[in-house]
């Protein structure tokens, strides 16, 4: 049973994923008449006051996905902001040098081409590395440190970024977001494996 901390996926009217919101924000959107349609599973019903004339109690049903009026156009050059949390999510909390899974505390951001050698702080130049591997690599490239990079770093699309930001993403939300991922997305493959493992 979902708790009130469960995130709700907000999209525009065309179904473009926009952001995660909480139940209060979803209720406010309902109240303001900004919901175009809902989909996904009903999560919970919020009860309000009793109407003096009809003696009926008001209620709002909150679904896992709510679409709001309006269409959101992203610039073709859009790149999501880079943070360690979403980077570690992108790389599935694996060190991309030794291949082992670690907790967030034991992970760090590694610049494939070090900043000291002209590398930039971009999605395509950063990977998740355990502290030990990052210290061993130091200010060198993987080739100079004789370390193999296990995956090519990539910049997530907006829909992928929304997924990476999510906490406790529900199956219906995951499927909805996955439909917006590029066909060649590494995240699409990971979600497919995750889905099959939990069947």
Image: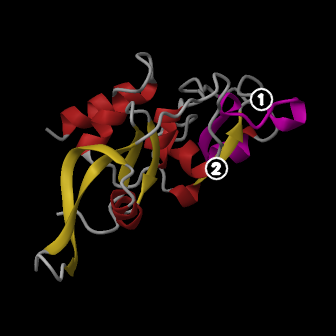
Can you name the residue that lies furthest to the left here? Answer: 55
Q: Which mark is residue 8?
A: none
Query: Which is more N-terminal, label 2 or label 1?
Result: 2
Instruction: Look at the numbered discs 1 and 2 and tell me whether their residues touch, using CB distance below 8 Å.
Output: no
Q: Where residue 117 appears, x then y in whole percent?
A: 88, 30
- Quarter of the picture containing the C terminus is top left
139 magenta-colored = no
Q: Which mark is residue 108?
A: 2
Q: Position of residue 187 (x, y in %)?
A: 42, 30
Question: What residue do we see at 40% from left, 55% from top?
Answer: 167
Residues shaded magenta: 113-136
> Which residue has dot 1 on it?
113
Residue 118 versus residue 60: which sits nearer the camera?
60
Q: In which quarter of the image is residue 47?
A: bottom left
Which residue does the image show at 68% across and 24% down from the upper left?
77
Q: Is residue 93 at least partly visible in the picture?
A: no
Residue 182 shows up from this direction: yes
Q: Count residues near mark 2 (Cα–Cα under 10 Å), then give few for <14, some for 14-19, many for 20+.
A: many
Q: How far apart are the two marked residues, 1 and 2, measured between alpha carbons? A: 15 Å
Total tally of numbered discs in the picture: 2
Instruction: Give residue 98's quadrant in the image.
Output: top right
Tag 1 secondary structure: loop
């Amino acid at each position: 049973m979902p708790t009130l901390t469960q995130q709700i996926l907000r999209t525009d009217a065309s179904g473009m994923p926009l952001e995660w919101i909480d139940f209060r924000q979803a209720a406010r959107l309902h109240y303001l008449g900004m919901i175009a349609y809902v989909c996904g599973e009903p999560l919970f019903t919020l009860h309000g006051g009793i109407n003096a004339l009809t003696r009926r109690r008001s209620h709002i049903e909150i679904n896992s996905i709510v679409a709001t009026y309006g269409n959101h156009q992203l610039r073709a050059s859009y790149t999501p902001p880079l943070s360690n949390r979403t980077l570690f999510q992108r790389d599935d909390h694996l060190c991309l040098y030794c291949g082992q899974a670690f907790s967030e505390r034991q992970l760090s951001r590694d610049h494939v081409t070090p900043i000291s050698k002209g590398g930039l702080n971009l999605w395509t130049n950063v990977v998740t590395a355990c502290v030990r591997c990052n210290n061993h690599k130091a200010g060198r490239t993987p080739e100079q440190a004789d370390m193999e990079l296990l995956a090519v770093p990539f910049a997530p699309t907006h829909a992928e970024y929304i997924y990476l930001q999510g906490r406790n993403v529900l199956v219906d939300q995951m499927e909805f977001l996955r439909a917006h991922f590029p066909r060649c997305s590494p995240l699409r493959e990971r979600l497919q494996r995750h889905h099959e493992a939990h069947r």
